[in-house]
Each structure stands twice: as structure tokens, then as C-alpha cells.
Image (cartoon, rainbow, N blue to C red):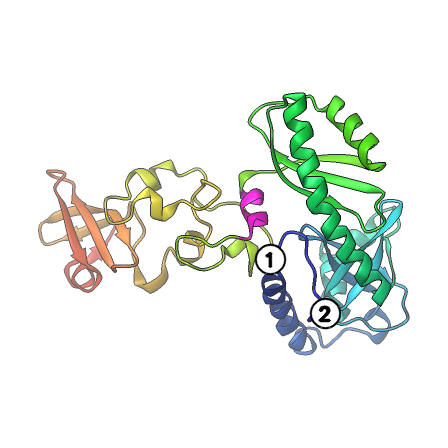
Amino acid sequence: MSNVVCSCLSGDNARVRLRLSQLLHKDSAALYEEATEELIGDICEVELPGCIRDFFRNTTGVLLEVGQMVIVESDGGYDFGVVYAAGLIARKKYLIKGLDRKAEETPAVLRFVTEDDLMGIGEVKKKQDEIRDVCREKIKRHGIDLKLVDVELRLDRQKLSVYYTSLHRVDFRNLVRDLAGEFKARIQMVQITTREEARRANASGPCGCHICCSTWMQKIHANPFADKAQYLDTAGNENNAFNMTGLCNKTKCCLGFSGNGGGLPQIGSRLSTPDGPAVVHSVDGGRKSVTIRYEKNSRKRSLSLERFNTLVTRKK
């Protein structure tokens, strides 16, 4: 675990996600008691640079463990990765995704990472810093309207992935030819969303902790509030848009997991109170307060959560 490397996450954050996987593997025997031994070590899931996960055939002849660094086949070349799932868990995930029914052959784990490979990984990471500066300069020279987010040079140095965001359709053919001539590698331009950009930033959120998608979240799920603009509009002073918007300029993912935390009501819920029907107008989880709006006169009233639970007798 001490040599975990990831191009877009720090080692500490990678360890968090790998630790979650290790805990799952610890309980795998109880989850899948019926599994047969011959299927245990044939498939593994590997996390590649850029937090991309894929499945590989284990050709090492050794049962892999979560956290081990390996060299894998990658699009006509090779790259490094960290074993994220192995054994029973990896085989089950592989079958659930239906990958066993695909015609193409699953790529293979070639070998374990050696000391020379570790030196090569360090050199590639240093080279990426230089490439990033050159890319910015060439983007500016070509006058292309895009924002460079990150670059990834494959371990064999035969492929360079350039990650960017843009609000418009971009013609980057001249840029690709320029970069290919400069670095003597195949260039892949990858447009990503602002949420993926935030994940790669490896930054801290307003809460003071590293953002969830850069640490413990296994993947970027669909935002539960993406189509609920009124969620922000009705937030009120206690729960303003600044506190509800993440680095990606979209509603925080954590709200999808904590919306009902601490017994807080859902915004828009209809209530019966001694003063007549009302609607939950906004909720402040930090202060544990609820603002309700009476239907008869649109008057708003802020209550502590304890007072709210005492006052509200019935929900419609």
C-alpha cells in the first residue's frame, strides 16, 4: 500500500478507496459461500491512472491481493495499475456486468511491478508536468477555446491522453498533429465534465474535507438533485446556494446521502400544523433548523428541529 500511485489522486485518497475494497473482500467468504475454487483467481479489477477501472485476466499464476501494483495490457501497449478487486468479488462484478458474454478477449495482467517499473512511473509523472506546460502553450498558440485539465502519459510512452473541458465544439486537429510531432506519441483528446474536473482537482470542499468523489466514492453517480433547480431556489438564508454547490458548480453529491440524515424533513413536504397546512420551505442541517411556509398566507416561520418535530402532528 505504501507505493500506491494515481495520476489524479493523492496516495492518501487512493488508500481510502482501497481500504473500502479490502473491507469488502474481508467479508466476501460470508457473501459468496457457494463460489468454487477454480473461479477465484482468474479475474481481477485494476484501477488505472485517472481513476479508471477495468477487468483483466490474471495470468501471473498467483492469487492477487487488493493494493498490489501490476503491469497490464493497455490498447496495444502496457500501463501500470493497482489491484482494486480480486478473487470472489472481482469474479462476481465481472459476471454482473455481463463481460463474460463479450466476444473480445479480456486483457491480461502481465506481471507485478518491479523496481525498474517504479522508477519508470516516477519519470513519467515528472514528464507529465513538462507536457502539461507545453500543452498549455500550444493551446494558447492555436487559439483554441478549451480548458486544459490534466494530461496522462502511458507508462510505455506510446499514448498521451489530454483531458479538457469546453462549452463549445472544438476543432483540435491542428493541435493533435502538433502534440504528436512534439511527443512522438498517439494523442487522445478526452472531453470531461466539470464533475470529473473537480474529482481530478484533489481539493478540499467548503466542509474542510477532501471532496467525496476524490476519496471514498467508488464512481461519480448521477447527481440526485441535478434536475431540481428549485432545491437551490428555495434554500433560504440558512441553506444558501454557496453551501449547497460543490467545486463542480453543481449541487453537492453528499446531499444525496444526507438528505434525510438526522431526521430532517424533505423540502416541499406538506404538513399539518396547529396554525393550518404548511410546506417545508428550507432545511439547515448544520443548525438543525427547518423553515416552513403556511399555505393560507405564505408566511414563513423558522423552527428548531426539536420544535418542528413537536409542532408537526401529521404529514400529508
Instruction: Decide which of tag 1 and tag 2 comes sooner along the chain.
Output: 2
In the rendered image, the quadrant that contains the N terminus is: bottom right
The part of the image, by quadrant, that contains residue 11 is bottom right
Local crowd at mark 1 within 10 Å, few (<14), some, or many (≥20)? some
* Lateral position of residue 115 relative to residue 2, left or right: right
**Residue 57 placed where, x, y %?**
85, 60
Residue drawn at point x = 79 percent, y = 52 percent? 99
Who is closer to the viewer here, 139 or 85?
139
Dot label at residue 62: none
**Residue 163 placed where, x, y %?**
66, 38
Look at mark 2 in the image and give the residue it sits on.
66
The part of the image, by quadrant, that contains residue 193 is top right
Residue drawn at point x = 84 percent, y = 67 percent? 115
* Depicted 19 relative to depicted 221: above or below: below
* Depicted 199 relative to depicted 136: above or below: below
- Kind of residue at disc 1: Gln
* Lateral position of residue 100 relative to residue 289, left or right: right
Residue 183 seen in the figure:
yes
Q: Which residues are magenta?
A: 195-202
**Residue 90 placed where, x, y %?**
74, 64
Look at mark 1 in the image and give the residue it sits on.
218
Main SS class of the magenta portion in the image: helix
The part of the image, by quadrant, that contains residue 300 is top left
- Kind of residue at disc 2: Val
